Image (cartoon, helix red, strand yellow):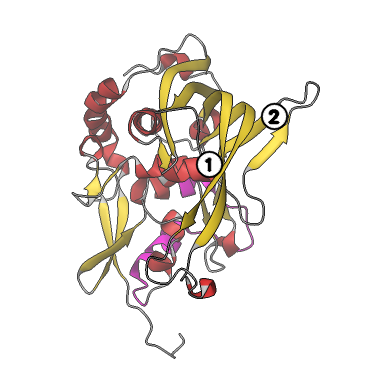
Amino acid sequence: MNFELLKDESRLLIEAELVPMQGTRFQPTGFPDLGAATYQLPGDKTSMLLLESAQSVANRLESTIWEEVAQDVVQPLRGIPYVVVKQEDKVLTNSLLEAHRLNSFYILEGKDRSFFDRLNKELDAPKESPVDFHKLATVLAKYDINSLLHGIFIAKKEIAAGRFKLARALSGFIEARNVGIVSSGGVKNDRVNPSADAKKGGGNIPYHREEYTAEEIKAYFSLDLAQIRGYRLSPEVEDLLIAIALYKIQSFLERGLRLRTACDLDYLSITVKRPVEFALPDLTTLTKALPDLVAAAKPAFANPPVTTVKYEAEEAGKKK
């Protein structure tokens, strides 16, 4: 896979045009005490809507490489490093699924301190000296390469006083343009007692809902190539990171656009906005190329690539 056109670029910018899978309405993401995130553009006052936030898209991109049935990464990426947490010999979670990746409570706060101590030793960051982000990137490539794309904050005072932090290299969001509100509603029926206590979930309960229509829906993705080069890792690891990011974007667009019950989208087109000369590989091409890219980057990974951590919950009423 040739990424030569990207070597001098600071960003890879991608846009995809989306439409509702059926009908014209869609349900946007909602925020506590806010609801849908609507706003107006300066100048012409066009009504806009943040259909899916950066944090939500990040979560959805991460989930594209996890195969729930197999309880492993998708086949083309078998061999990449990540951390599995086990409790009483059963898999509890892993660093690919945890919101804070290696900084997960279940990875760093359990009674089993072996991985915490290993991480602390390999990062080797004195409290009163500049932190070495190349060393952080090397350790992340070894144990959880996903963190190099989606960022991490190792918020532990014992490890460089909590100063190890990487921003997302891969990010995305979805916006809708010239939106209109579709107001509707319904009733939750209680077929036993329509006048039962509504506070306890009984009785007939009417509700209001708002959906939206839009002139245009677009997904935007950004891959920070300068940040990836700044890790100062091998060319093989850099190429693998770019390929994983592109696989996640293509997989999300082809398989992950059912965002909510009332928000099922399809994509019409995908366009590279920067650099415009770059030909974006499709999902089939990426799927075929990834195993060789994983193999080429293998020297940077832990051996074996999947690290196991044991987590033992505290007994009720006891503190550490």
How many numbered discs? Answer: 2
Residue 16 in the image: state x and y as whole percent: 48, 22
Q: Which mark is residue 47?
A: 2
Q: Where 270 falls versus 102 (above or below)?
A: above
Closer to the chain start, of discs 2 and 1, is: 2
Report the mark closest to the observer, 2 or 1: 2
Span highlighted in magenta in the image: 111-137
- Residue shown at 37%/53% (left/top)? 97
Residue 182 in the image: state x and y as whole percent: 58, 36
Helix, strand or loop under label 1: loop
Q: Of all residues shown, which one is farthest toward the right?
A: 43
Amino acid marked by disc 2: Ser
- Residue shown at 45%/46% (left/top)? 59
Other residues around mark 1 within 10 Å, as few (<14) / some (14–19) / many (≥20): some
In the rendered image, residue 123 lying in the magenta stretch gets the answer yes
On screen, residue 103 versus residue 240, left or right, reads right
Amino acid marked by disc 1: Arg
Q: Where 226 falls versus 203 (above or below)?
A: above
Residue 76 in the image: state x and y as whole percent: 23, 34
On screen, residue 298 versus residue 95, left or right, reads left
Other residues around mark 2 within 10 Å, as few (<14) / some (14–19) / many (≥20): some
Q: Where 163 falls versus 134 (above or below)?
A: below
Q: Do the residues labelled 2 and 1 touch (CB within 8 Å)?
A: no
Disc 1 target residue: 168
Residue 298 in the image: state x and y as whole percent: 26, 39
Quadrant in which the C terminus appears: bottom left
Helix, strand or loop under label 2: strand
Q: Which of 197 and 274 is in front in this view?
A: 197
Q: Can residue 112 be seen in this view?
A: yes
